[in-house]
């Protein structure tokens, strides 16, 4: 490369003196006709395997509709262990530093600690999400909000933040933030997927 630049500078200098010099064209690097992927650990086969083998999808709700997501990392050891057991593996990795994520990089997930039985991490209804891919507020990192039905209330399945906020306003549920962050990328949502 330095030789080519030197030849070009020399050519320009000679041109200024009135002498014509031809600069050799850069040579192309030969490209292989085909690439042998056999040494790549069977990537062809891996691409057709179901993602559930690696990170099982979990159901949740957004704006009244169903969505599917995965858990990959958590800032709290107990939560990482609970989610790993809930998914029957694979490992949800402990990353304590996630708890230091600035608020503007977080979205919310609402996790029920009592109420209607279901597939949520505590054995109650699925989680509610406040944003999905395509929303300006979408972030895969989620601030965990624990939702608890009040004594004497009538638990029911809620499927949107609006329904949840109404229940909170009516004194039916309380919402607390324990300072836990979980990476929960959404893969399928109402009207979209990736």
Image (cartoon, helix red, strand yellow):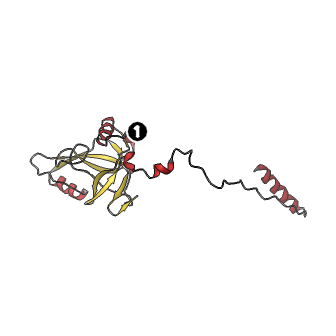
- Counting from the top left corner in percent of width and height, residue 140 is at 38, 51
Residue under the image location 35 percent in, 46 percent down: 71
Q: Secondary structure at mark 1?
A: helix
Q: Quadrant of residue 90?
A: top left
- Counting from the top left corner in percent of width and height, residue 185 is at 38, 51
User: Position of 12 compared to 173: left or right?
Assistant: right
Task: For label 1, count other residues whose C-alpha is less than 10 Å away and answer few (under 14), some (14-19) or many (20+).
Answer: few
Q: Residue 172, relative to residue 12: is it above or below?
A: above
Of 5 and 69, which appears nearest the observer?
Answer: 69
Q: Quadrant of residue 136?
A: bottom left
Of 29 and 177, which appears nearest the observer?
Answer: 29
User: Position of 46 compared to 84: left or right?
Assistant: right
- Counting from the top left corner in percent of width and height, residue 53 is at 38, 46
Residue under the image location 34 percent in, 64 percent down: 191
Residue under the image location 27 percent in, 55 percent down: 61
Give the residue pinned by disc 1: 97
How many labels were placed on the picture? Answer: 1
| Quadrant assignment for the C terminus | bottom left
Q: Residue 112, relative to residue 21: is it above or below?
A: above
- Counting from the top left corner in percent of width and height, residue 4 is at 78, 53
Q: Residue 14, relative to residue 142: is it above or below?
A: below
| Residue that extends furthest to the left in the rendered view of this protein | 152
């Amino acid at each position: 490369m330095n030789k080519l630049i030197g030849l070009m500078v020399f050519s320009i200098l000679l041109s200024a003196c009135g002498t014509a010099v031809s600069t050799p064209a850069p040579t192309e690097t030969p490209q292989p006709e085909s690439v042998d992927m056999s040494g790549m650990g069977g990537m062809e086969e891996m691409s057709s395997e179901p993602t559930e083998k690696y990170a099982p999808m979990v159901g949740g709700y957004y704006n009244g509709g169903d969505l599917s997501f995965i858990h990959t990392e958590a800032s709290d050891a107990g939560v990482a262990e609970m989610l790993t057991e809930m998914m029957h593996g694979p490992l949800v990795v402990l990353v304590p530093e996630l708890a230091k994520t600035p608020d503007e990089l977080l979205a919310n997930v609402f996790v029920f600690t009592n109420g209607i039985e279901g597939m949520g991490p505590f054995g109650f209804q699925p989680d509610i999400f406040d944003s999905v891919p395509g929303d300006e507020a979408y972030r895969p990192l989620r601030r965990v909000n624990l939702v608890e039905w009040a004594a004497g209330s009538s638990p029911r399945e809620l499927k949107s933040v609006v329904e949840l906020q109404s229940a909170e306003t009516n004194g039916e549920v309380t919402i607390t933030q324990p300072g836990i962050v979980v990476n929960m990328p959404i893969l399928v949502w109402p009207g979209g997927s990736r």
